[in-house]
Image (cartoon, grey):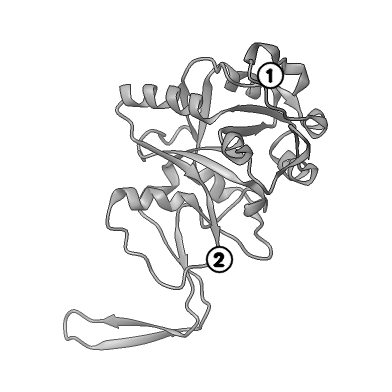
Amino acid sequence: MEQRIFSDILIKFFEKEQWADDFLAGKLYINQAGKFITDENKFRGDNYEGSQVFSCDKPLLVQFTRTDNGETIQLPLQARTPIKQSFEGANKVPIFCASGLNKNNFSKVETNKYELDSNYITYMEQFGKYAVMFSRKEFLDKTHQVLNNLCIACISGDVHYKEYDNKLKHFETIKDQYEQFFCKYISEDRHYDKQYEWRLILCDTNLIDGKNDHYELGIGRLKYATPVINTEILKKGIFSFHEELTECKSKEI
């Protein structure tokens, strides 16, 4: 039961308190994928953002065929050579990121008392030391209403972590291409799986023009969200369940 209830809670970390306040007010700053691609730090930057990467256990043979006379040239690639493919405009896809709760980053302290893993919070502090916890359902209800009015399609879900694929995908639909943004490739020096990331992806490569690196969206103030919390306070906080919402005070979180 606990896992099902906690699954509705998302956490967003911010570098500045003002940005956290803006989010509570329903002002979303949704970054383009290119911002993550070009970010050089290891906890956020990802050259494979939105791309499929496959690496075969056996050598791969690439064949070049001349169209004028049919002559072929074969180019062997060594085994385990990472090969990346993405679609045109992928770097302009707007992505909103948050972090979810699961059995790996929270635990039961005693009956009806739970806490976040301090190592998880320390890792996420790299994104900022101001946090807001909020309802996934309320956020999506508000966001979908606004996006529907703007005729902007979107998809959302948890990020899945994996090593390189062992075969090349064929993206048969546009949705398949956007769903690739739910995949993050991990390795010994790529620890994205520690983020337990959740994403909202806007399926439009034309929302962000060349003058900006983000898209702004107003969804209205969030009701089911905490005030801005410093991560040091978050490490000391206790979660508990109460049937009467009015009895729960924000200072107890």
**Image x and y of residue 17, in percent:** 70, 23
> Looking at the figure, which quarter contains the C terminus?
top right
| Sequence-first disc among 1 and 2 | 2
> Looking at the figure, which quarter contains the N terminus?
top right
Q: Label 1 belongs to which residue? A: 227
Compared with residue 88, is residue 54 higher up or lower down, i.e. above or below?
below
Judge the density around disc 1: few (<14), some (14-19), many (≥20) Cα neighbours within 10 Å.
Answer: some
Between the C-alphas of marks 1 and 2, the distance is: 37 Å
**Image x and y of residue 29, in percent:** 53, 28
Where residue 46 sits, quadrant-wise, is: bottom right
Q: Residue at x 50, y 81 (%)?
A: 57
Q: Nearer the viewer, residue 17 or 164?
A: 164
**Image x and y of residue 171, in percent:** 32, 58
Judge the density around disc 2: few (<14), some (14-19), many (≥20) Cα neighbours within 10 Å.
Answer: few
Q: Residue at x 63, y 65 (%)?
A: 187
Three-letter amino acid code of the residue under disc 2: Glu
Q: Label 2 belongs to which residue? A: 163
- Residue lying furthest left: 68
Where residue 168 sits, quadrant-wise, is: bottom left
At mark 2, the secondary structure is loop
